[in-house]
């Protein structure tokens, strides 16, 4: 019994990720973007702990990796695209273009699928990422309704069809870009080896403490910038002489 629980626990957590994504889509259909956003955050927590459970329990099933990608496709691909589509509908209409411009939102699951497929076959991503992880993109999108709820004066900047279109295209590009980004997986407690991870966690905690959800876009930008600095330093250190 104990071995069976150990074997299936990570996949059960992954299924909770998928379930959260499905519930979030229902909330989006009901135009409840706040709860839909929370569903993404909940799915991200499950997504973190399924991998954590696999490593701690040394339990790696044959279907685990594929199941994780399928769950991520719903929670961090389809759900954020549904939220983005609703944001387009709430934005002031753009004459002659709005009905078609809104569909740009569904580029998110397309590029998320490409990102997840690349991850499953790319040996370079065992300890780091190439391209923006789908949970980071989804969390960024999920922050928009929550930011508007906390700071209604920012709604006019977020609910802009042209701005949302540019944002969507840029984020889709980052999902599949040959951009090295750090993973938050700690192999050990060595401070020097994990200094960039500690900096990211400290900076994120401080910003979120003071600015709450409004800090999320800044945290994602800091994550990308810090990853680029880390990669350049590693590249420089590996150059002989």
Image (cartoon, grey):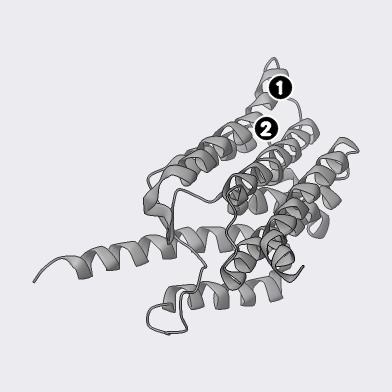
Placement of the N terminus among the 4 image quadrants: bottom right
Pick the front one: 111 or 69? 69
Q: Secondary structure at mark 2?
A: helix
Q: Position of residue 156 (x, y in %)?
A: 74, 44
Residue shown at 83%/55% (left/top)? 149
Q: Residues within 10 Å of mark 2 (few under 14, many from 20)?
A: many
Q: What is the number of callouts on the image? A: 2
Q: Position of residue 141 (x, y in %)?
A: 67, 48
Q: Which mark is residue 43?
A: none
- Residue 36 in sight: yes
Pick the front one: 207 or 10? 10
Q: Which mark is residue 98?
A: 1
Pick the front one: 50 or 39? 50
Which numbered disc flags the more N-terminal residue, 1 or 2? 1
Q: Position of residue 207 (x, y in %)?
A: 63, 72
Q: Position of residue 223 (x, y in %)?
A: 50, 62
Q: CA distance from mark 1 to mark 2?
A: 8 Å
């Amino acid at each position: 019994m104990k071995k069976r629980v150990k074997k299936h626990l990570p996949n059960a957590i992954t299924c909770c990720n998928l379930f959260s994504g499905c519930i979030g889509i229902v909330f989006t259909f009901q135009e409840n973007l706040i709860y839909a956003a929370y569903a993404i955050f909940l799915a991200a927590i499950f997504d973190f702990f399924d991998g954590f459970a696999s490593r701690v329990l040394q339990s790696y099933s044959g279907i685990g990796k594929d199941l994780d990608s399928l769950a991520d496709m719903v929670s961090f691909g389809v759900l954020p695209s549904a939220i983005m589509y609703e944001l387009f509908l709430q934005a002031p209409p753009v004459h002659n273009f709005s009905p078609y411009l809104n569909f740009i939102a569904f580029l998110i699951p397309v590029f998320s699928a490409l990102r997840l497929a690349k991850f499953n076959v790319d040996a370079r991503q065992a300890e780091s990422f190439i391209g923006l992880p789908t949970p980071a993109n989804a969390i960024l999108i999920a922050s928009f309704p929550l930011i508007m709820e906390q700071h209604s004066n920012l709604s006019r900047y977020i609910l802009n069809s042209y701005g949302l279109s540019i944002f969507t295209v840029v984020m889709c590009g980052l999902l599949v870009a040959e951009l090295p980004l750090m993973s938050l997986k700690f192999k050990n407690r060595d401070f020097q080896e994990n200094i960039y991870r500690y900096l990211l966690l400290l900076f994120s905690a401080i910003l979120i403490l003071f600015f709450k959800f409004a800090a999320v876009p800044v945290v994602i930008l800091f994550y990308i910038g810090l990853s680029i600095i880390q990669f350049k330093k590693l590249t420089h250190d590996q150059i002989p002489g």
